[in-house]
Image (spheres, rainbow, N blue to C red):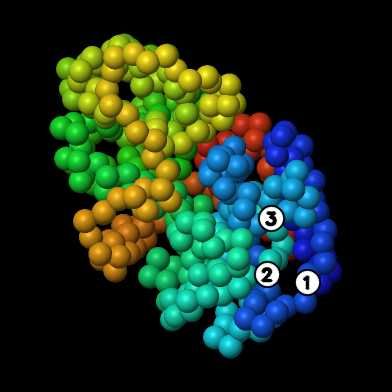
């Protein structure tokens, strides 16, 4: 791969199954800019959700493609500075943050401090800060060299789970002592259940036949139930909350039919079943529990977490590092190197042809 070219996985905004690898020249850096090589990045069902909401949640704006009909899906990855025209960023420094599914990219560091920087590129000016921040590894309390794969695969997802728990705590768990979690084999769901059980709540994971053994063997749940058996196995006499990662609009109503008023609240927090989510029309309004859509960036902007940022980071780091060790026992890192391998991995994740135990770490560098 030429050092003066950027390779990028791009998707047709009108057809997520249509992809290409674009090749563009690296532009000459302006004063204040840095060229960052993208060492590697994780790719999970969450990245497909970024594409699904590319327009509505502005994910396409982070890393614009040359052709407006195409989009570059964001991911989370490690970066190394290859060239710098920024006085406070040195070549060779390593960072963690939101990256394009590409070989390298040009950033415009702003508000630089010992912890990292915000990307001050004009097109990112109004985008959520949580995605614009890049963390220096040497100052990152959640970084450990022996857990790099775990950080790629879990840190952003764990943060979502951590905020979901914080929301539930601030609302006294809506009076529930039991949480039902759909898409139980997905990584965010497992992190959420792990956190809830540490706080004394019971959890039930809902999953398909394909994910049942993995979800049970992970030992993250008190019980694991198939979707079509939920009506038989779930106890209607306990007050529960549903956190739905599947994106199935009907699930909350189905569980309300079983639980009645003992289903206290529904939180929609993901769309692992993205085809069902896209095909679903607006549900008919029916009696049932209150519900909310949980989007991490919006939640951070709109809510008071009842804790200062420093204490929040400290609490997160402590539990996250412990979770990395726990997750290492049940997740298998699968590495894919080179543009063809990156494209093949995308196709597998989009088609749902992956094992729940697999965690994909990708790189354009061979």
Q: Are marks 1 and 2 in contact (CB under 8 Å)?
A: yes
**Label 2 residue SS:** strand
Q: Secondary structure at mark 1?
A: loop
The residue where tag 1 is placed is: 27
Residue depicted at x 52% and y 75%: 110
Circle 3: is it few (<14), some (14-19), or many (20+) Cα within 10 Å?
Answer: some
Q: Quadrant of the C terminus?
A: bottom right
Rendering coords of residue 279 (x, y %): 58, 21
How far apart are the two marked residues, 1 and 2, measured between alpha carbons?
A: 8 Å
Answer left or right for 297 relative to 60: left
Q: Residues within 10 Å of mark 2 (few under 14, many from 20)?
A: many
Badge 1 or badge 2: first in the primary sequence: 1
Question: Is residue 73 toward the left or the right of residue 141 in the image?
Answer: right
Verify CB contact (< 8 Å) between mark 2 and mark 3.
no
* Residue 5 in view here: yes
Q: Residue at x 34, y 33 (%)?
A: 292
Picture coordinates of residue 15, whole percent (x, y): 72, 33
> What number is the disc on residue 64?
3
- Residue 249, numbered label: none
Cβ–Cβ below 8 Å for labels 1 and 3?
no
Indicate the quadrant where residue 109 lies: bottom right
Residue topped by disc 2 = 106
Picture residue at 56% right of the left edge, 30% below the top: 274
Q: Is residue 177 above or below residue 288?
A: below
């Amino acid at each position: 791969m030429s050092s003066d070219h950027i390779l990028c996985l791009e998707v047709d905004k009108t057809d997520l199954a249509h992809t290409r690898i674009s090749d563009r020249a690296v532009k000459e850096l302006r004063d204040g800019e840095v060229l960052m090589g993208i060492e590697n990045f994780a790719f999970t069902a969450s990245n497909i959700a970024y594409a699904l909401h590319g327009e509505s949640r502005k994910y396409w704006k982070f890393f614009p493609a040359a052709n407006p009909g195409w989009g570059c899906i964001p991911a989370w990855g490690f970066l190394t500075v290859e060239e710098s025209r920024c006085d406070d960023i040195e070549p060779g420094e390593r960072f963690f943050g939101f990256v394009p599914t590409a070989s390298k990219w040009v950033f415009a560091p702003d508000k630089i401090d010992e912890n990292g920087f915000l990307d001050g590129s004009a097109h990112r000016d109004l985008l959520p800060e949580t995605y614009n921040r890049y963390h220096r590894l040497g100052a990152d309390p959640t970084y450990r060299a022996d857990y790099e794969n775990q950080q790629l695969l879990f840190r952003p997802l764990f943060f979502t789970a951590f905020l979901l728990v914080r929301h539930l705590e601030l609302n006294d768990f809506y009076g529930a002592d039991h949480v039902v979690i759909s898409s139980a084999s997905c990584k965010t769901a497992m992190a959420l259940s792990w956190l809830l059980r540490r706080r004394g709540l019971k959890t039930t994971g809902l999953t398909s036949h394909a994910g049942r053994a993995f979800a049970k063997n992970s030992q993250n749940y008190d019980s694991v139930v198939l979707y079509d058996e939920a009506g038989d196995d779930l106890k209607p006499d306990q007050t529960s909350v549903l956190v739905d990662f599947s994106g199935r609009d009907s699930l909350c109503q189905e569980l309300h039919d079983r639980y009645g008023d003992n289903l206290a609240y529904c939180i929609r927090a993901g769309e692992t079943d993205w085809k069902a989510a896209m095909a679903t029309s607006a549900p008919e309004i029916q009696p049932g529990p209150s519900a909310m859509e949980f989007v991490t960036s919006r939640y951070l902007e709109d809510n008071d977490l009842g804790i200062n940022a420093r204490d929040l980071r400290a609490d997160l780091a402590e539990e996250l590092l412990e979770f990395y060790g726990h997750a290492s026992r049940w997740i298998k890192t699968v590495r894919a190197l080179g543009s063809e391998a990156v494209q093949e991995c995308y196709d597998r994740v989009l088609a749902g042809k992956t094992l729940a135990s697999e965690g994909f770490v990708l790189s354009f560098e061979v």
